[in-house]
Image (cartoon, rainbow, N blue to C red):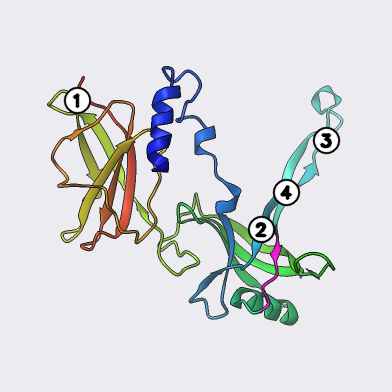
């Protein structure tokens, strides 16, 4: 119902896309609440979102090395980047019996490093990962408020940008793999008002295709989510309006989402 009301609002307020451009950068911005800090357990077979977390800051910086000389042009100092470093600040409500805080407490007590991963909980994709040591882990218990924690992690070596160096599988804190991408292309169909859609890679023999069409941005399904959109055989033309988005979802035989891709509709006028 909310999506239907939102669509109606877009039709009412669009005014030829004069001021509600949902292809703009603002429409693609991420919500901070979706970004989670997670840690691997000591055996490396389970990724756990830190319980109770509220605030998260990822710090990245580099030293500067001055290379000014007497003949530096204009009398301005000149510098180059030196060694890089990173750290993570995290805070929230303290949940002492949660496994994630048990791991953190044990690592702090033993001065052991922890393997951390920052993920986008909405798109189910990794953002950053690396090895770090716990340098600060205070617990605050005010008289008139909830017990909270603050956590500072100092990086050991490289902070890997998982949006550039994609890993497979891209494990999420619940232990499931992330939904994988599809390349979707929309071209003019043979029939007016239709689009011909091509998908790469093609689906597995037992898998299914579903699709949905609408104003950008279309909401991505979660990995394993049961899909109730319109079924598609992978070849028949689809009726759609040029400029909208079309999303193709590949599922397993039971209709659970495995892969997804989006394209802007090009339709036969």
Q: Earlier in the sequence, mark 4 or mark 2?
A: 2
Spatial CA span between label 4 and label 2: 27 Å
Q: Which residues are magenta?
A: 91-96
Looking at the image, do the residues carrying marks 2 and 3 touch, with CB atoms under 8 Å apart? no
Disc 4 + disc 1, Cβ < 8 Å: no
Contact flag, marks 1 and 2 (Cβ < 8 Å): no
Residue at the spot of label 3: 68
Residue at coordinates 49% horizontally, 49% vertically from top-left? Answer: 164
Q: Is residue 175 left or right of residue 50?
A: left
Query: Which quarter of the rendered picture does the N terminus lie within?
Result: top left
Precedes in sequence: disc 4 or disc 1: 4
Residue 257 image position (x, y, % from top left): 31, 57
Image mark for residue 62: 4
Q: Which residue is mark 1?
A: 193
Say which label, 1 or 3, has the lower sequence index: 3
User: Label 4's element?
Assistant: strand
* Label located before the other in sequence (2 or 3): 2
Q: Is residue 94 magenta?
A: yes
For disc 2, the marked residue is: 54
Density class for disc 4 (Cα within 10 Å; few <14, some 14-19, many ≥20) is few
User: Is 51 or 176 nearer to us in this picture?
Assistant: 51
- Viewer-closest of 103 and 96: 96
Q: Residues within 10 Å of mark 2 (few under 14, many from 20)?
A: some
Q: Position of residue 107 (x, y in %)?
A: 68, 78
N-terminal-most mark, 1 or 2: 2
Toward which corner of the image does residue 73 lie, by quadrant?
A: top right
Measured as percent of width and height from the top left, residue 204 is found at 20, 58
Q: Nearer the viewer, residue 144 or 169?
A: 144
Can the viewer see residue 171 in this picture?
yes
Q: Is residue 87 above or below residue 29?
A: below
Label 2, secondary structure: give it.
strand
- Mark 1 element type: loop
């Amino acid at each position: 119902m909310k999506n239907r009301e939102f669509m109606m609002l877009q039709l009412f307020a669009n005014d030829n896309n004069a001021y509600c451009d949902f292809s703009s950068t603002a429409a693609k911005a991420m919500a901070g609440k979706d970004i989670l800090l997670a840690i691997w357990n000591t055996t490396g077979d389970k990724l756990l979102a830190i319980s109770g977390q509220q605030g998260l800051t990822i710090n990245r910086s580099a030293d500067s090395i001055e290379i000014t000389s007497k003949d530096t042009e204009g009398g301005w100092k000149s510098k180059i980047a030196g060694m890089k470093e990173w750290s993570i600040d995290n805070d929230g409500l303290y949940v002492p019996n949660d496994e994630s805080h048990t791991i953190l407490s044990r690592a702090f007590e033993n001065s052991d490093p922890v393997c951390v991963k920052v993920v986008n909980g909405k798109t189910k994709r990794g953002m950053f990962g690396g090895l770090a040591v716990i340098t600060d882990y205070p617990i605050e218990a005010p008289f008139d408020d909830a017990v909270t924690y603050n956590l500072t992690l100092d990086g050991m070596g490289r902070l890997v940008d998982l949006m550039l160096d994609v890993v497979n599988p891209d494990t999420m804190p619940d232990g499931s793999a992330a939904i994988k991408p599809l390349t979707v292309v929309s071209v003019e169909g043979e029939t007016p008002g239709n689009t011909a859609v091509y998908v790469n890679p093609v689906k597995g023999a037992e898998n299914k295709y579903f699709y949905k069409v609408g104003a950008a941005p279309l909401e991505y399904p979660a990995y394993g989510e049961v899909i109730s959109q319109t079924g598609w055989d992978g070849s028949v033309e689809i009726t759609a309006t040029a400029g909208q988005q079309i999303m193709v979802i590949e599922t397993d035989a039971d209709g659970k989402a495995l892969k997804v891709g989006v394209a802007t509709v090009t339709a036969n006028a």
